[in-house]
Amino acid sequence: MYNFYDYSLPKLEELIVSFNEKKYRATQLFKWVYKRKVFDFDAMSDVSKTFREFLKENFVFIKPKIYKKQVSKDGTIKLLLELEDGAKVETVLMRYNYGNVACVSSEVGCNMGCAFCASGILKKQRELKVSEILGQVLVLNDLLFEEGNDERITHVVVMGTGEPFDNYDNVMDFIRILNNPHGLEIGARHITVSTCGIVPKIYDYANEGLQINLAISLHAPNDEIRNKIMAISRVYPLDELMKAVKYYEKTAGRRVTFEYILLKGINDSKENAKELAKLIKGTLAYVNLIPYNEVSEMKYRRSDEKTVHEYLDTLMKLGVTATIRKEFGSDIDAACGQLRAKEERRD
């Protein structure tokens, strides 16, 4: 059986043609499913009866199931979702004044080995299928519908558990469904993919010809610090990463966001801020400073508020555009991987 949600429009067109049907049938199906929310093939009146019977026998609509739900007092919703094979992944709904943001995972577990990150507590089991990434957005849309309003997910960030560029093809097909005017129709500039720095894939991403945003999990202003907290830096040092960033900006015509988690006594000094400003000089980059969500299994601690604001002020005085990320879900298992790790330990 084919899970409909596994197919971007180009992939569905290929599949439909392989069934000796016209390619335009794929667009028809996309419109029925994603625009009209019709999942009964018998109700798809512009599709031939013979093909409808074929579809009923060969296609299914399978989404993840909600295993656990946490709701914060600020309205943030964190879900632990169960997949068909019993694996579990996290997704988060954050409510901003400009829309509803879904933070989705791309893998079951993570092998990147960032020393401060809860996602890596449980190592990578496998990549997520397209339907399993897309399903996170669909389930959140279902929750918004159940709240009794006309809202839906308007922005998507691929910043949950896993390294998106370690599951590149499936993540790109997921994005194509999000962005397709016959799909979920989420604007390219409302979609962001975050990588810890897999340099070859940054070049591939730049050459996709899309206007999708790119964020880099940087977290250090020099290789000495980055090597200690991010294993990827030993493979792709900062000079290689920055060359890729500049190529992306030139080719895609989009500026990069650098994500920078402030860790007490590790990367949060004024000197570190000056190093960071020097590192990213010559780019259009924007820096998103992130207060650390402490993880009990990790030795790292959150920088105090004074230090965070001094770091921001130093960057701003040096001409760097930077902000401090608004925190969501502080009263629930906010950090990526925390809820899943907690449930796995219980099991």
Image (tube, rainbow, N blue to C red):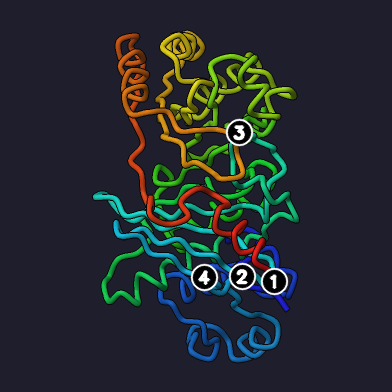
Q: Which mark is residue 196?
A: 3
Q: Earlier in the sequence, mark 3 or mark 1?
A: 1
Circle 2 is placed at which residue position?
82
Q: Nearer the viewer, mark 3 or mark 1?
A: 1
Amino acid, disc 3: Cys
The quadrant the N terminus occupies is bottom right
Residue at image x 48%, y 55%? 333
Q: Quadrant of residue 241?
A: top right
Q: CA distance from mark 3 to mark 1?
A: 27 Å
In the rendered structure, which amino acid carries the disc numbered 4?
A: Lys
Q: Choose mark 2 or mark 4, whichever is in front.
A: 4
Q: Do the residues under discs 2 and 3 have CB atoms within 8 angstroms?
A: no
Q: Are marks 2 and 4 in contact (CB under 8 Å)?
A: no
- 7 to 253, vertically: above or below: below
Q: Earlier in the sequence, mark 1 or mark 4?
A: 4
> To which residue does mark 4 refer?
68
Give x and y (percent) for residue 259. 47, 31
Q: Nearer the viewer, residue 39 or 19?
A: 39
- Distance from the alpha carbon under mark 1 to that under mark 4: 13 Å
- Measured Cα–Cα span from mark 2 to mark 3: 26 Å
